[in-house]
């Protein structure tokens, strides 16, 4: 990839429609290059075999990416029954093959058991770390390490269509959910095994598929004269901070907060509150404890004006 000089200060969120057969980091680096952005990061990776909504944060917006990592998500999933794989998706080696004999009623019963608040053991093919190394590195060496079951929530697990040995689902879930593990658990409950054949993300927090931009759209604007057109595709830095209490600071309060000091406010205790100046400029995220406002993540106002 040809290097570009004089990286720009770009701030905002791009809702990218990630294509298949490319890693989240690979497409992130391409998009960053197209924008000639000084800083960028994604908010929750999709596997190369998965497609769909991948929010990319630029510049100061990266400071608030955790709020998108921690939010709920929705997927369109195609499961292949009768075949279980090492990775619980189509890229893994086949572990077992069994006949598919379950009825629609048995499928619904198995799905019902996986709805709501449940415990899920993370897949070995995940980026979770054990003794400083991602689990997938152990898995590739054929090593299985202990993993604790983690609480997750499956808000919606809906059958869209069923074929002979496959089915399409919609899954709306909490953060930390592994769709591959969900489908593997479904197959085990049905006694035949299953894996993810296709996965497409359609929602991340407040963002939906209708807002996505394709790499082809970005490539079509790939010249220095089109910076305004590229930048117009970005959402504001605070677009992912929906649901947080909004607090406008006066000049004195702003001065204290931006210098790392606390200040008095008339708000109940709040873990996360989004802070704005009197001119509607996002200042960052704060926390209120017993009437005192403390900063948690602040934007660099000098970079925003650069």
Image: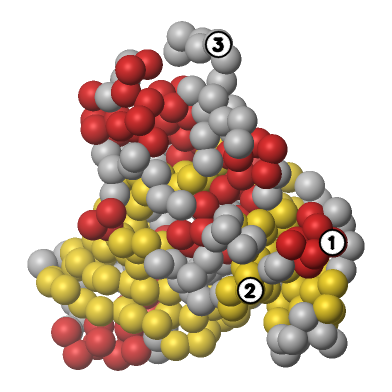
* Image quadrant in which the C terminus is located: top right
In the picture, residue 20 is in which quadrant? Answer: top left
Q: How is the image coloured?
A: secondary structure
**Label 1, label 3: how many angstroms apart (C-alpha)?**
37 Å
Nearer the camera: disc 1 or disc 3: 1
Quick one: label 1 or label 3, which is nearer the N terminus? Answer: 3
- Where is residue 25 drawn, in percent x and y? 50, 35
The residue lying toward the viewer, choosing from 48 and 29, is 29
* Residue that badge 1 annotates: 256
Q: Name the residue under label 3.
A: 5
Mark 2 to mark 3 CA distance (whole Å): 39 Å
Q: Residues within 10 Å of mark 3 (few under 14, many from 20)?
A: few
Give percent across and percent down for residue 102: 21, 80
Whole-number angstrom distance, CA of label 1 to CA of label 2: 15 Å
Look at 19% across and 67% down and name the residue there: 167
Quarter of the figure that contains the N terminus: top left
Considering only vertical position in the picture, is 303 above or below 243?
above
- Kindly check if marks 1 and 3 are in contact, taking CB atoms under 8 A apart as contact: no
Instruction: Return the residue at label 2.
Output: 247
């Amino acid at each position: 990839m040809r290097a570009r000089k004089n990286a720009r200060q770009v701030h905002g969120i791009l809702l990218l429609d990630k294509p298949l057969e490319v890693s989240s980091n690979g497409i992130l680096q391409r998009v960053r290059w197209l924008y000639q952005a000084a800083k960028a990061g994604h908010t929750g990776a999709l596997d190369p075999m998965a497609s769909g909504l991948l929010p990319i944060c630029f510049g100061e917006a990266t400071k608030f990416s955790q709020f998108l990592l921690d939010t709920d998500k929705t997927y369109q999933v195609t499961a292949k029954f009768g075949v279980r794989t090492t990775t619980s998706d189509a890229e893994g080696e086949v572990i077992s093959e069994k006949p598919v004999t379950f009825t629609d009623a048995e499928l619904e019963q198995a799905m019902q058991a996986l709805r709501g608040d449940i415990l899920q053991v993370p897949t070995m093919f995940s980026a979770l770390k054990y003794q400083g190394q991602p689990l997938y590195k152990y898995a590739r060496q054929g090593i299985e390490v202990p993993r604790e079951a983690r609480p997750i929530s499956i808000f919606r697990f809906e059958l869209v269509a069923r074929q002979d040995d496959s089915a399409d689902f919609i899954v709306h879930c909490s953060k930390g959910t592994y769709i591959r593990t969900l489908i593997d658990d479904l197959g085990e409950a049905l006694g035949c095994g299953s894996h993810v054949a296709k996965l497409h993300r359609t929602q991340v927090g407040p963002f939906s598929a209708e807002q996505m931009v394709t790499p082809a759209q970005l490539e079509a604007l790939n010249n220095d004269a089109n910076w305004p057109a590229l930048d117009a595709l970005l959402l504001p830095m605070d677009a992912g901070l929906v649901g947080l209490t909004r607090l406008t600071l006066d000049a004195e309060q702003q001065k204290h907060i931006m210098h790392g000091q606390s200040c008095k406010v008339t708000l109940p205790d709040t873990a996360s509150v989004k802070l704005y100046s009197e001119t509607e400029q996002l200042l960052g995220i704060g926390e209120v404890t017993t009437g005192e406002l403390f900063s948690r993540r602040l934007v660099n106002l000098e970079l925003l004006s650069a």
